[in-house]
Amino acid sequence: MPVTRIMVREGWCDADLQTLSETLHEVLVAEFSVPPTDRFQIIETLPASRFIYDRHYLSGGRSDRYVLFSLVAGKSRTTAQKRTFYRVLSERLQQRLNLDPDDVMVVIQQTSAEEWSFSRGEMFDLSMIK
């Protein structure tokens, strides 16, 4: 049950943003144990003056095509799942969008089930998933 913010600089076309979204969801389902219908994403395109990042911090060099994926997840994943998720996402984005792996950053924040309400003011419980 992740919610993901996808942040990019202005200049991305709608088709490429759709590919980012679809690729992320595909990899979440395949590698992160996310149900296919569990898709919640926010895509933000920001002017350069509002999307500030170090081009070289722990990277071979970020370009203007840098993408930041910020996931809030409500279920723990193993280190192996996270490692595979990062790798496969980066590989698929390189294949589909010619996105340099140095331009892909992912941050995962962990929450507990009690910190989610999907609707009707009800606290989420795992029994709600059928």
Image: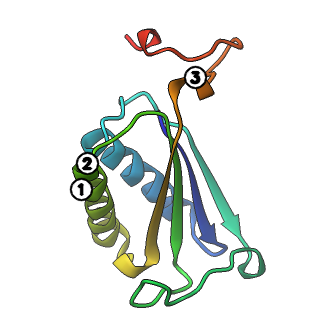
Q: Is residue 114 above or below residue 79?
A: above
What separation in Å lies between label 2 and label 3 (alpha carbons)? 23 Å
Mark before the other along the chain sequence, 3 or 1: 1
The answer to whether marks 2 and 1 mark residues whose Cβ atoms lie closer than 8 Å is yes
Q: Position of residue 20 (x, y in %)?
A: 45, 58
Q: Nearer the viewer, residue 18 or 80?
A: 80
Q: Position of residue 72 (x, y in %)?
A: 54, 44
Label 2 neighbour load within 10 Å: few <14, some 14-19, many 20+: some
Residue that carries the numbered disc 1 in the rendered image: 84
Q: Nearer the viewer, residue 72 or 31?
A: 72
Q: Is residue 75 above or below residue 57?
A: above
Q: Residue at x 32, y 60 (%)?
A: 86
Q: Position of residue 125 (x, y in %)?
A: 50, 14
Q: Secondary structure at mark 1?
A: helix
Q: Position of residue 93 (x, y in %)?
A: 35, 66
Residue 100 showing in the rendered view: no
Q: Nearer the viewer, residue 88 or 82?
A: 82
Residue that carries the numbered disc 2 in the rendered image: 81
Residue that carries the numbered disc 3 in the rendered image: 114
Q: Secondary structure at mark 2?
A: helix
What separation in Å lies between label 3 and label 1 (alpha carbons)? 27 Å
Q: Amino acid at mark 1?
A: Thr
Q: Is residue 114 above or below residue 49?
A: above
What separation in Å lies between label 2 and label 1 (alpha carbons)? 5 Å
